[in-house]
Amino acid sequence: MNNAPIGVFDSGLGGLTVWSELYRKMPEESLIYFGDGKNCPYGDQPREKVISYVDDAVRRLIDKGVKMIVIACNAATAVAIDYLRKTYPIPFIGLEPAVKPAALSSKSGVIGILATKATLEGRLFRETSQRYADRVRILAQVGEGFVELVEENREQSPEAEQIVGKLLRPMLEAGADRIVLGCTHYPFLAGVMRQIIAGRNVELIQPAEAVERQTEAVMQKFDLRAESGHLPTYEFCTCANEAYRQRLIAKSETAKQMIF
Ligand code: DGL
């Protein structure tokens, strides 16, 4: 048993789509969310820079006494997870695009993957997509501009329709029936994606539930669960500023309401 908080990290607001699942399914666990916010987006930045941003955030979370950390960011996982596991003694949960469930459930044999450049160029994605390449055709696409739409609260705007439609429509036209959201910001764009998909038998696949299950399994393995009846606390931190921290809190409310 361990009542210390779980750390949840992302480059910005996106990891709240994972945080909300932990919040819902683990009512006795305290959570500290760290959204960088100052250096976001990570997706196009050099590896060394991303590793140093993640390292800084992880140290701050460890200083706050977290018992484990969920890296709720595919880009940060792709670049930094090996380094983190080698450097720090606590367990880390990483994220990678959900290629496997998409490939195994696709009926058309075509799946679309939307993610950042860092994720699509990473070893984890390369290895997983090679494993399923004989089963399905994988259309991988960088979600150019998607993270900015979410960070700027423009998910419901006409530009969102335009920016998302431009990349999503060609996947649908090529016959994709599963679209993997390989960046934790993208589930905030699910509304606009569903309008574009309307009428087609296409599923959006996001990782939050699988990550929550994996977190439970790791807590079980290392006896890290909070005591039953433990009253949780929720904290939000950033290396941006107080206004951004308030945005994290407001967006966490939106994430809690999202039914995927
Ligand atoms: N939310 C992050 C992810 O899951 C990416 C955002 C970024 O590029 O910083 O990949």
Image (tube, rainbow, N blue to C red):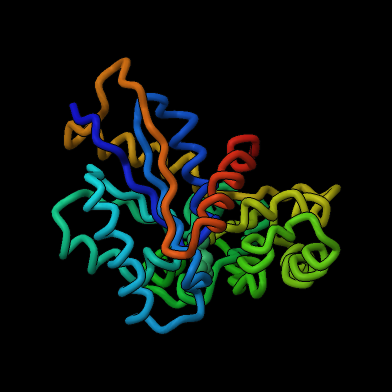
Q: Is residue 135 visible?
A: no
Classify the position of the N terminus by image quarter. top left
Q: Residue at x 32, y 15 (%)?
A: 229
- Determine whether, in the image, residue 224 is placed left or right of residue 176: left
Q: Residue at x 73, y 57 (%)?
A: 155
Residue 70 x %, y %? 35, 50
Q: In the picture shown, does residue 89 fall above or below 75?
A: above
- Residue 217 image-quadrant placement: top left
Classify the position of the C terminus by image quarter. top right
Q: In the picture shown, does residue 101 fall above or below 135?
A: above
Q: Is residue 222 visible?
A: yes
Judging depth in this view, the residue of 37 and 146 nearest the camera is 37
Judging depth in this view, the residue of 69 and 253 nearest the camera is 253
Residue 118 x %, y %? 46, 75
- Determine whether, in the image, residue 11 is placed left or right of residue 172: left
- Residue 52 image-quadrant placement: bottom left
Q: Residue at x 42, y 52 (%)?
A: 237
- Determine whether, in the image, residue 92 is placed left or right of residue 115: left
Residue 179 x %, y %? 64, 57
Residue positioned most to the top? 229
Residue 161 x %, y %? 81, 63
- Tally of numbered tags: 0
Q: Residue at x 32, y 73 (%)?
A: 51
